[in-house]
Image (cartoon, grey):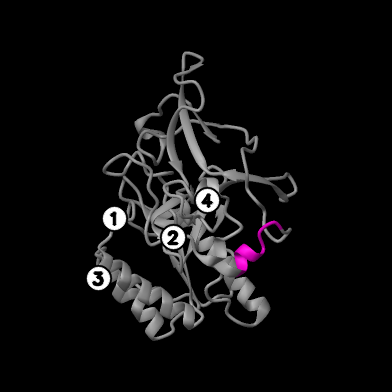
Amino acid sequence: MHAVAPGANVNFVASASCNDSDFLDALNKIVDKKLANIVSNSWSSIGENEDPDLLQAYQQVFFQGALQGVGFYFSTGDDGDDSTVSDDHQPEINFPASDPLVTAVGGTSLAVTKSNGYGGETGWSTFSTTLTNGQWATPLAGTISGAAGGGTSKVFTQPWYQQGVVPGSISKKYSSTPARTIPDIAAVADANTGFRVGETQTFLDGSVKYAEYRIGGTSLSAPLTAGIMALADQVSGRPHGFVNPALYKLAGTGALHDVRGNLSIPAVARVNYNNSVDASAGTPRPSCVRST
């Protein structure tokens, strides 16, 4: 967030655990004390199989936040349609990102020109394959290693702001009644086109030193979007709060890039470390990582 909005005041509110009751306590604290106008969340459950009372409790927090001008941003997850991680191996979308009163942030692969201009985007899904005896072990695309979450809700009907914007081929995937679909907006999440970050770390040999590495995932795109909205609040001189109705009014205009289809982004050929730190434990065969 600070990379995008270095002047923003950031409060860190931690949940006591990963239990829903503690997450609700943390979110309620933000709303009750009005600790922020923009709340970035990089957590979720796989699927929407939640207790109805729990869904109602979250709804109350998000509704109260919308009334007070607080915008909640949730990452959509890094497992694509969740079919490889859900219990029944069926497509799912994650909650709370699927809640109609939050802004669900998906992920893209972002191309940048030589002059640091906008080179285009495609939905993020990364596949990798290994080079063996001069041949790729698996024809591209290979094995998926991460993809932005998204899809159609099995719990929430279509909110008013998506009407006339989201095509029926998506919103009516499970029923003739249109349903909530996500993401609402997306930003760069592909680690191969993402951010380089640096921090002081403890290494395998016990040494403590500064080092840099690349990061990605919708846990990158969600705070980046929160930072962008902080800038928007600063420029307008007021909080935008629950921003989804405004976002969907911008559909089809030049204010947003409509990410459709595939962008021809070259693959990344690299040699990784076996220990993920350095070459002391050797290196595997070169890998080709391709976003498609």
Q: Position of residue 22 (x, y in %)?
A: 26, 71
Residue 224 screen position, x and y as percent: 54, 61
The secondary element bearing badge 4 is classed as strand
Label 3 is placed on what type of residue?
Ser
Within the magenta stretch, is there residue 247? yes
Eye-nearest disc, 2 or 1: 2
| Residue at the disc numbered 2 | 157
Label 4 sits on residue: 107
Q: Quadrant of residue 114?
A: top right
* Label whose residue precedes the other's in the sequence (4 or 1): 1
What distance separates the C-alpha of mark 2 from that of mark 1?
A: 15 Å
Hey, what amino acid is under mark 1?
A: Asn
**Secondary structure category for the residue under label 2:** strand
Q: Residue at x 42, y 44 (%)?
A: 81
Q: Which residue is mark 1?
A: 49
Magenta-tinted stretch: 246-252
Mark drawn on residue 21: 3
Front residue (pair 222, 271):
222
Report x, y in % for residue 270.
Answer: 51, 32
**Alpha-carbon distance for marks 4 and 3?**
28 Å
Q: Residue at x 58, y 72 (%)?
A: 230
